[in-house]
Image (tube, grey):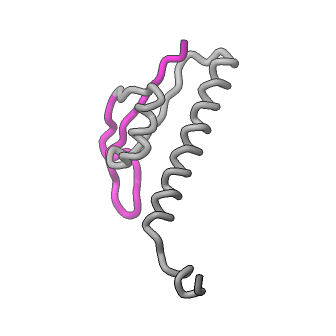
Amino acid sequence: MHDQEMARPSLNHSMNHAVLIARIATKLVNRMIIEAKKNGIRKLEAESAVDNISSVRLAKKLGFVIEGTKKSALKVGNKYVDSYILGKILK
């Protein structure tokens, strides 16, 4: 393979990278849930920008539910965006 071919951006590489990041995030949150249970924590909460679809999807996948919305709660760049409050009761 020539150096020029290796330097080209690859959609496949980007997709694999996104999958890897998602897997790492899932493992980290699962580990946090395990440790929280071990330490007697009854509930976990998270906050995510409404338009951060990946984070909201991950939280829902791990059993979090949207409990509410905060208006103009987070500053992203030069603007304020709404955020979801997500919660998970630990059993």
- For the point 48% across and 29% down, the residue is 62
Which residues are the magenta region? 68-91
- For the point 39% across and 39% down, the residue is 57
In the displayed structure, 16 sits above or below 83; it is below
Where residue 61 sits: x, y (%)?
Answer: 43, 32
Can you tell which quarter of the image residue 71 is in? top left
Q: Give the dominant element type of the magenta stretch: helix, strand or loop.
A: strand
Can you tell which quarter of the image residue 75 is in? bottom left
Q: Nearer the viewer, residue 23 or 57?
A: 23
In the displayed structure, 87 sits above or below 1; it is above
- For the point 41% across and 46% down, the residue is 54
Q: Nearer the viewer, residue 80 or 53?
A: 53
Was residue 83 drawn as part of the magenta stretch in this picture? yes
Where residue 24 sits: x, y (%)?
Answer: 59, 45
Where residue 50 sits: x, y (%)?
Answer: 33, 44
Q: Nearer the viewer, residue 71 or 1?
A: 1
- For the point 46% across and 58% down, the residue is 15
Can you tell which quarter of the image residue 35 is in? top right
Quadrant including the C terminus: top right
Residue 25 located left or right of residue 67: right
Residue 83 located left or right of residue 12: left
Residue 40 located left or right of residue 6: right
